[in-house]
């Protein structure tokens, strides 16, 4: 029996691919920033499709310093790889920057996709990229993002280690080498002993992983900014959430529609988190009240919790020695019952700090050694140089003025300012209207009318076309194949 979605398309005389593109066109009634690009093979079959909306582009402008993308299978009836571009937002949650369906995982397909993504994001390059280690993907990253540091996804590495080796004793030490806060010499010792203990010196996968250690070991990646994007649990969470919205048998039109529902779900969660921090501050738990309260006013709730953990450990930091130079003050610090020491420098004139552990450079939060020095200096606030904008509460609420522009050309920053202001009004409206049932019914009815009125206005102003494309687009092949004669079409 033909699925309902396929039957409707057959009656309309459109292919599945054309229906998906037309659906993207209809989204412009509510989002003038929707963008898509696709390529066709020599038989005019859909080969690759990439799309994003206005919110995704704005999110990338704020959080696009780190980028992760991963290919999964079986999310559509054609079994084409699904690629999701993602990152980490200011609540430490996954944020989606865009999505693509590819006909294959060739180097050419990934280069096409990354170049389309880069053009859509106005040429902004990420500082770091995390992938699953696919060779074609890695090659494309080096071509399109030549200055980005490439990291292998921890989740895929741990899964591969379990499949390739599978020995619990080895896996425990491998996890330590992967995720542990180790120095390079400590990593080398643990790795060598672990490999020798399990007689894996000639194991091909082990040899390959050691050669790639600068792409996955915390000890060797230190100092490269990844904002905590190791994708260890994020891959699992992303796939689990997708399963709630997207079924394996969906055609392209259904897939695109339900993926947009998934994005709406993720964004509602972000709004809930924004609402929570907007009303009330966390309870002070340390004896360093002044600096803790300051952090609570600056950071989002989840980032503040991480900072507070660091603050609680600051009592274990002791300043061993200080040395003043012409440029800065150098502090040698040590942790309680630890043999190792670290060097913290403070440029007093500019109020800038740095530490030899490079935690600030890697994650974007001051390390315990820096915080220990702040306490030693009796500071009650966190210096501006140690506060990364991407972790701040107000990072997605810019105060840029809204210049008058033509319809559909409101700048992203101004759009988000208007969006935030409207949300504040809506929160109060929701609270007031839910006190009495008759008010709830009245407001809900008026909102429905206003919503439909705005949709009609958008349709007229934006001139949403009847067809998303004048080009005849055939459905993609179910099996993957090598494409050639690519022709690109942009929305």
Image (cartoon, rainbow, N blue to C red):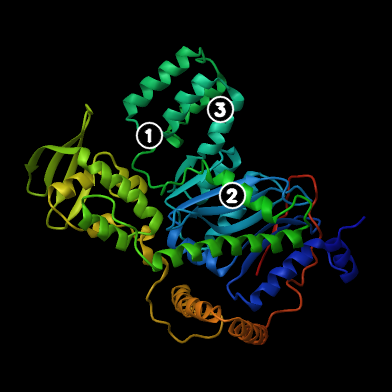
Residue occupied by mark 1: 220
Residue occupied by mark 3: 161
In the image, 378: left or right of 67? left
Marks 1 and 3, how far apart at CA = 19 Å
In the image, 406: left or right of 219? right
Badge 3 density bin: few <14, some 14–19, many ≥20, Cα 10 Å: some
Identify the image quadrant of residue 433. bottom right
> Do tag 3 and tag 2 residues touch (Cβ < 8 Å)?
no
The x, y position of residue 81, in whole percent, is: 69, 48
Badge 2 density bin: few <14, some 14–19, many ≥20, Cα 10 Å: some
In the image, 55: left or right of 83? left
Residue drawn at the location 66% of the way across and 59% of the way down: 259
Residue occupied by mark 2: 238
Label 3 or label 2, whichever lies nearer to me, is 2
Marks 2 and 1, how far apart at CA = 27 Å
The x, y position of residue 77, in whole percent, is: 79, 51
Can residue 126 be seen here? The reply is yes
Give the mark nearer the N terminus: 2 vs 1. Answer: 1
Which is more toward the observer, 337 or 8?
Answer: 337
Q: Could you say whether the residue bearing mark 2 is in a helix, strand or loop?
A: helix
């Amino acid at each position: 029996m033909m699925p309902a979605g396929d039957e409707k398309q057959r009656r309309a005389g459109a292919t599945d691919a054309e229906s998906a593109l037309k659906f993207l066109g209809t989204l412009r009634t509510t989002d003038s920033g929707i963008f898509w690009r696709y390529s066709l093979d020599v038989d005019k079959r859909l080969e690759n499709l990439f799309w994003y909306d206005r919110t995704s582009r704005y999110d990338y402008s704020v959080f696009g310093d780190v980028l992760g993308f991963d290919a999964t299978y079986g999310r559509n009836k054609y079994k084409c790889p699904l690629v999701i571009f993602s990152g980490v937002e200011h609540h430490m949650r996954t944020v989606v920057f865009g999505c693509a369906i590819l006909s294959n995982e060739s180097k050419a397909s990934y280069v096409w996709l990354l170049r389309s993504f880069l053009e859509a994001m106005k040429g902004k390059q990420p500082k770091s990229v995390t992938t699953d280690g696919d060779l074609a993907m890695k090659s494309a990253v080096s071509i399109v993002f030549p200055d980005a540091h490439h990291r292998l996804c921890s989740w895929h590495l741990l899964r591969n280690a379990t499949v390739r080796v599978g020995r619990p004793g080895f896996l425990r030490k491998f996890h330590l080498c992967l995720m542990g806060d180790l120095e390079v010499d400590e990593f080398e010792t643990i790795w060598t002993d672990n490999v020798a203990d399990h007689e894996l010196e000639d194991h091909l996968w082990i040899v390959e992983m050691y050669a790639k250690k600068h792409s996955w070991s915390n000890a060797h990646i230190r100092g490269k900014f990844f904002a905590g994007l190791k994708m260890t649990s994020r891959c699992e969470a992303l796939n689990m959430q997708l399963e709630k919205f997207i079924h394996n048998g969906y055609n392209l039109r259904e897939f695109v529609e339900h993926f947009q529902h998934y994005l709406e779900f993720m964004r509602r969660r972000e709004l809930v988190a924004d609402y929570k921090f907007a009303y009330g501050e966390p309870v002070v738990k340390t004896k360093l009240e002044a600096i803790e309260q300051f952090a609570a006013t600056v950071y989002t709730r989840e980032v503040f919790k991480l900072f507070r953990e660091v603050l609680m450990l600051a009592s274990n930091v002791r300043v061993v020695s200080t040395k003043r130079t012409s440029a800065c003050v150098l502090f040698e610090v040590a942790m309680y019952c630890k043999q190792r020491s670290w060097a913290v420098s403070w440029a007093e004139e500019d109020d800038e700090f740095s530490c030899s552990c490079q935690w600030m450079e890697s994650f974007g939060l001051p390390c315990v050694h820096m915080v220990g020095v702040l306490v030693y200096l009796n500071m009650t606030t966190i210096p501006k140089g140690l506060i990364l904008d991407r972790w701040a509460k107000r990072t997605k609420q810019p105060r840029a003025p809204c210049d008058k522009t033509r319809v559909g050309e409101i700048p992203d920053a101004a759009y988000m300012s208007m969006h935030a202001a409207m949300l504040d009004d809506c929160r109060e409206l929701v609270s007031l209207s839910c006190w009495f049932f008759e008010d709830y019914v009245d407001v809900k009815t008026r909102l429905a009318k206003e919503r439909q009125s705005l949709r009609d206005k958008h349709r007229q102003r934006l001139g949403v076309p009847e067809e998303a494309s004048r080009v005849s687009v055939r459905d993609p092949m179910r099996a993957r194949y090598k494409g050639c004669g690519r022709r690109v079409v942009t929305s």
